[in-house]
Image: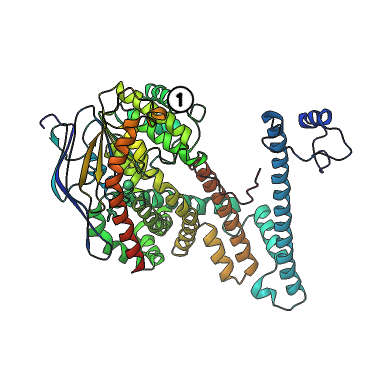
Amino acid sequence: MSTEGGAPPFSSADVRRQDAAPGPLPNPPPQAGEGYVAGSIDADLIARRSRTVRRRRLVIYALRVLFAVFWLGSWELSTRLNWVDPFFVGQPSGVITRLWTWITEGTALGPLWFQAAVTMEEAVLGFLVGSGLGIVFGILLGRIELLAEVLSPFIKAANAIPRVVLGSLFAIMFGLSVWGKASTAVVLVFFVVFFNAFQGVREVDRNLVANARILGADNRRLTTEIIIPSAMSWILASLHISFGLAIVGAVVGELFGATAGLGQLIYNAGHTFDVNGVFAGMFVLAVLALIAEGLISALENRLIKWRPSRVSGEVPI
Amino acid sequence: MAGAAIELRAVTKRFATPNGGIYTALHDLTMEVAPGEFCAVVGPTGCGKSTTLALISGLERPSAGEVAVMGKPVNGIPDGIGYVFQTDAVFPWKSVLENVAAGPRYRGTPGGEARAQAREWISRVGLAGFEDRYPYQLSGGMRKRVGLAQSLINGPRILLMDEPFSALDVQTRTLMENELLTLWSSTSASVVFVTHDLEEAIALADRVFLLTAGPGTVKGTFEVDLPRPRNVAEIRFQPRFAQIYEAIWNQLRDEVLVSYERQKHASAV
Ligand SMILES: Nc1ncnc2c1ncn2[C@@H]1O[C@H](COP(=O)(O)OP(=O)(O)OP(=O)(O)O)[C@@H](O)[C@H]1O
Ligand SMILES: [Mg+2]
């Protein structure tokens, strides 16, 4: 405790222990049962735990930085030494320069933030509509057996076709409007969320359903209080993948017709053999996807606080 | 009997087995429970005790025969049924308080009042202070008690209990058994109490049904003419208790042996 690095200089536990058993060596933490005093020891344990958690987090961040430095460094070095041709694989310093000019002077299509906003609007719309429809239909078909049996071959067929090609269809249907791209995102997102929601409903513990029915739940309550919470872990798991797919949909949609957006920016860079531009565009997309992933994780933690936390780096008390 | 609270007449229940066959869990089972009567059901494992409760609760339908509750044929879940399940059936996404308050809420009690009732029941089953915990933060025995409070809060007229106390330690178990008897005597509920434990069955019940090794049917019915109110901890020392125990055990033993032999053969094949 007091000998450990980073320990608070003073804690109630130290005081109590000093008059209890003075000695040259720090005392081992008292075992539960032998003179266990809840308050003070708990405080000490909690402090120690949060210290361990902090230290662990620091190590992980340091390792991440180290990894990035190694990866980017070896990339930069191998292009500098001309082991590989930077014309084809780009160069981190070139990517950074390109990003910087985009930020300060704008891109060929206009300001960078605008491109990002356009693509995000498409992706977020597609994500919301696609996952909303996926959840509704997944739960509906999961609950109504007949509907599921009738529709299942059609859904499987629809899922089997490569849906990105629908992008060209949507470009014709919606022209250059945001829905041309958002629709592509919708069809990509829908199926993933749908299948998960459906499976989630099917996997509901029958015992819980029986219990709820005995307790007097009607069909509506059964759906809102048992089926949906139970399927929620499945649905949330699918949302993690779905946002990435929504971005894919938006970017592919932009290929079939757009005047702005990160996808468009990347194609432009590609057409002018600007590999660094392609990477810079990808980098911006990746950052946006990471932010979205963080938001979805936050939502998940909020909705599923009834589950033992599965945070990496669980530290025992 | 016209006024029976629960009536199973010549009930057979078959299940489809995974390999396409048919398994008969109950065969030609007939039993009656009077209003306000406390019945226990004992029998070797796999003999169809849980299936019997599922039939009474309307969760399962009989393959043949009739089931009636309060004089009405069971079609869907009858009114006034409480069911404490053998396996864990508390809702993992609800806190203890919400779990216990679920029944009243589903039955139309306003949220605040339902929670007030729930608090009372939570302390009655000895879980005061754990209202805000989620089931994963409770021990198995505590979860069982949540399940108990969850059923009892609805004031059931028919209470089906499937080994409700088997996960509890002996002291808590005795406490809960006594508490159950007190609660039951203040209501007019009929109880069907499934247990492996013959002592528990005799200590609690007015009548013990003994089922045969599967397919289950009633092998014998035993009146428990011990005086009430009973103290579960002490009633075991009465000579009459021992007599009843011996009478039932003599017959139960044979069924347990049959069941055991069968399982040994099944696992040998
Ligand atoms: N849904 C089902 N499908 C197929 N077989 C079933 C089903 N439910 C129960 N059975 C079978 O019916 C028999 C009776 O089951 P039940 O659960 O009623 O036994 P039990 O008397 O409650 O046993 P235990 O004391 O071990 O709880 C068992 O052999 C079981 O395998
Ligand atoms: Mg059982």
- In the rendered image, which residue does mark 1 sit on? B123
Task: Answer left or right for A69 relative to A133.
Answer: right
Residue B246 versus residue A115 in the image, above or below? above
Task: Answer left or right for A81 relative to A143.
Answer: right
| Residue B259 on image: x %, y % | 30, 55
Q: Chain of mark 1?
A: B
Residue B164 versus residue A135 in the image, above or below? above
Question: Farthest residue toward the right?
Answer: A24
Describe the element under mark 1 as helix, strand or loop: helix
> What amino acid type is highlighted by mark number 1?
Ser
For the question of whether residue A86 can be seen, the reply is yes
Task: Answer left or right for A65 relative to B144.
Answer: right
**Residue for point 32% across, 40% down:** A211
Along the viewing direction, whichever of B218 and B18 lies nearer the viewer: B218
Mark 1, residues whose alpha carbon is within 10 Å: few (<14), some, or many (≥20)? some
For the question of whether residue A217 can be seen, the reply is no
State which quarter of the image contains the C terminus of chain A: top right
State which quarter of the image contains the N terminus of chain A: top right
| Residue A19 on image: x %, y % | 83, 28
Along the viewing direction, whichever of A245 and A198 lies nearer the viewer: A198
Along the viewing direction, whichever of A43 and B86 lies nearer the viewer: B86
**Residue for point 16% across, 51% down:** B63
Question: Farthest residue toward the bottom?
Answer: A83
Residue A195 placement: quadrant: bottom left
